[in-house]
Amino acid sequence: MAAATHVTDILSVLFGAYLAHLLRFGTGPIGGNEITAVFVAILILLFMFPALRASGFAALEHPWRGLKRVTIAFALLIAVLMVIGFGLQTAEQYSRLWVVFWILSTYVSLISTRVWWAGLLKHGIDVGFMREHVALVYAGGARRLDEIKHQLHRRQYVIEAVVPIDGEGCSDQRQCLVGEGRSFENASEFAQGIGELQLDRALLIPSADDERDLQEVSRPLRMVSLDVDVIPSGYDPALLGRSSRLVGEIPVVSLMTRPLSDLDVLVKRLEDLVLGSLFFILLTPVMAVIAVLIKLDSPGPVLFRQARAGFNNRPFTVIKFRSMRVHDDPQVRQAGRNDDRITRVGRFLRRTSLDELPQLLNVIAGDMSLVGPRPHALAHDREYSQVIDTYIARHRMKPGLTGWAQVNGWRGETETLEKMRKRIEHDLYYVDEWSLYFDLKIILMTPRVLKHENAY
């Protein structure tokens, strides 16, 4: 929803500028100054509107409050443009009539599209396809849980999961499927199973009787990529300075957000589609030669498929060139030095990471990204999540074909726990510090580390 409103906001600025040009200058050519002003306005809009919560679901759920936010954000945008114009002494280069027409037509377009989006959202909620899906995560003794459920149902929210922060594992799976959505026995179990759910956010309901602070209570939720709002039970310093809103008629305070905003997700997806498709086309001849060499080297299929955990622990099937002899080994062992399962061609492919090239198809399909934490075998995920507290937090981002850990030398076999800890440390740094520049930097660093002593 946020990405959609961003698009119509940008179109409103463009439409307003074009209409202003027609009203002021007719069908004459558009000047460079006008293009510059529009470009700068769009850049400011992309930062200012999300910061002031003037876009996305929060601005549409309550239309009048959303229109007020849009008005304030647009007024500040114009003020910033004026400061820039007078500061650079370029204001005199613009026709005053064009500026007035542009401001008025853009504002009318912004309001009109907001009203349209709000109407579409209301209709979508009424018929069921645009309802917000939430998980209720509550601390023991949260007396308001039933009342909150009732209010959410009345405003047509979909409760996908009910999760007590503390508790023990679910002894009977049938007991986990009760009432509203799926019921988990504790937050750790919820973090492991979140990939099976379609969630928009979690609502954390702390108990006034709980002596722990909010940061301690919410720690398990920091392991997953999910917006988390708190329904406060009293004063907590962790909520100072944080933005608030209404979920239905329930006041909530934002505690944490996903690593990537909706706009960031769109940018990263475009990066994957454009560069992933380009790399796939350029490397198709190389992959064809590799396929022939694999067939000539040993019997068996060219490609190897294996289940891996992706974004928010959601399972997917990863595709690689087969680098080992076909074998029936019930244990999932990491490849080691002088591993007799690896074929002659496979040894070269693994040392140069060329066995990973078919994963470009995973990238284009959307299961993976060009850059991100490398996906591990499910058995290794289960093993390391038991001994490294923050292990599962690497799944807050899509797995990648290359990653920050890999270009820093933390690839190949992790025969010691400390090596895996260093890999996870680099993965989490990437998740927390993501930017388009960071992705491009990692992509450019990848060729020089393809042949590494740890890869075999």
Image: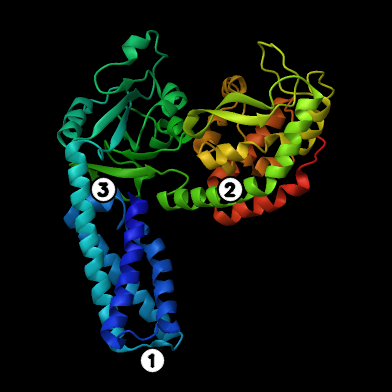
Q: Which mark is residue 133?
A: none
Q: Quadrant of the C terminus?
A: top right
Residue depicted at 44% across the width and 28% down the height: 195
Residue at x-position 54% and y-position 42% = 364
Compared with residue 270, is residue 73 higher up or lower down, i.e. above or below? below
Residue at 72% over, 17% down: 326
* 1 over 126 or under it: above or below: below
Q: Position of residue 211 (x, y in %)?
A: 36, 29
The residue that disc 2 covers is 277
Using the numbered discs, state the Cα–Cα distance from disc 2 to disc 3 in whole angstroms: 40 Å
Q: Is residue 311 left or right of residue 104?
A: right
Q: Position of residue 453 (x, y in %)?
A: 82, 36
Q: CA distance from mark 1 to mark 3?
A: 41 Å
Local secondary structure at mark 2: helix
Relative to residue 11, is residue 435 depicted above or below? above
Residue labelled with disc 3: 245
Q: Nearer the viewer, residue 210 or 18?
A: 18
